[in-house]
Image (cartoon, rainbow, N blue to C red):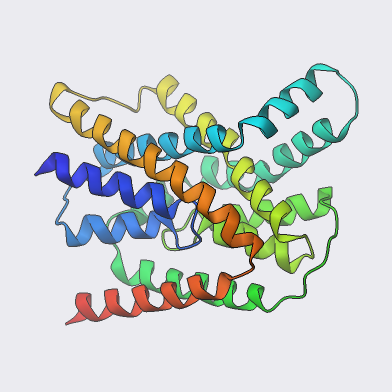
Amino acid sequence: MELIKAAILGIVQGLTEFLPVSSSGHLELFKYFLNDDAVGEESLLMTVVLHFATALSTIVVFRQTVWELIKGLLKFKWNKETQFTCFVILSMVPAVVVGLFFEDQLESLFNKNIILVALMLMITGLLLFVADRAKQTDRSLNFTNALVVGIAQAIAILPGISRSGATISTSVLLGLDRETAARFSFLMVLPLIFGKIAKDLLDGSFSANAANMAELGIGFLSAFVTGLFACTLMIKIVRKSQLKYFSYYCFAVAIISLLIYLL
């Protein structure tokens, strides 16, 4: 049963990390409705492992872009690859600040708080609905836009606020074209994920025994495979500019979850 739960959590993470419907919110909902009582360190470890899996799937999907960025950086010149990397670094600042100074407060929110998750899902739905109605322009990414999108990413740490939904919607509202918005959204989170894992490893925050290693492995594999599928699918969806359907989904999940929880 525990392995099945791990597989389900991995599939949910893989699908919802890229689709703008909040992976963290869905994981909290599934942990609640599956009666998963894992809290604290154990729950945090599974969450990070699942995020690590989807980060790897992002690298696989954007492997050509990542390779071009690496080659551009190795030229040690101010080129478009170096500029894009600087945008990514700047976008990380708000989330890093929030993570460093409010880590304990944030972790306390990831305790199957269904009301909070439902409310945040509604906010995500509203943001997607508004962004879907925004005029399409082809403005270039700049330092100001990167910082604003980074602030949106920091806010999306809250369970129920979709990170991809918040960053893509913010980018679209700032006038960036949707394909650029999606690419920046998916790549800007990679340094944060790997940085978080490195920090926790150095702090000794992770400890896994033989009993839960199998669960972590199943969760990782499920998240990685479904992440490959969802990332590729999301790129196609963003190009067609159909964010409103995800907003309807977020509203529906929020309302249904609230009704089940309250009744």
Q: Quadrant of the N terminus?
A: top left
- Horizontal and vertical percent position of residue 88: 71, 40
* Above/below status of 63 relative to 94: above
Residue found at the very far left of the displayed protein: 1
Q: Residue at x 48, y 32 (%)?
A: 56
Q: Is residue 207 left or right of residue 21?
A: left
* Viewer-closest of 185 and 177: 177
Up-down: is 124 above or below 78?
below
The residue at 85%/35% (across/down) is: 80
Q: Residue at x 82, y 53 (%)?
A: 144
Quarter of the image where one finds residue 187: top right
| Horizontal side of residue 246 vs 77, given as left or right | left
Task: Give me the residue at 48% from left, 27% from top.
Answer: 199
Figure quadrant of residue 35: bottom left
Residue 110 in picture, x, y percent from top left: 34, 53
Residue 105 x, y percent position in the rendering: 42, 51
In this rendering, is residue 108 above or below 251? Answer: above
- Please indicate whether residue 72 sits to the left or right of residue 258 in the image: right
**Looking at the image, residue 40 lies above or below residue 195:** below
Residue 107 seen in the current view: no
The answer to whether residue 76 shows anywhere in this view is yes
The quadrant of the rendering that contains the C terminus is bottom left
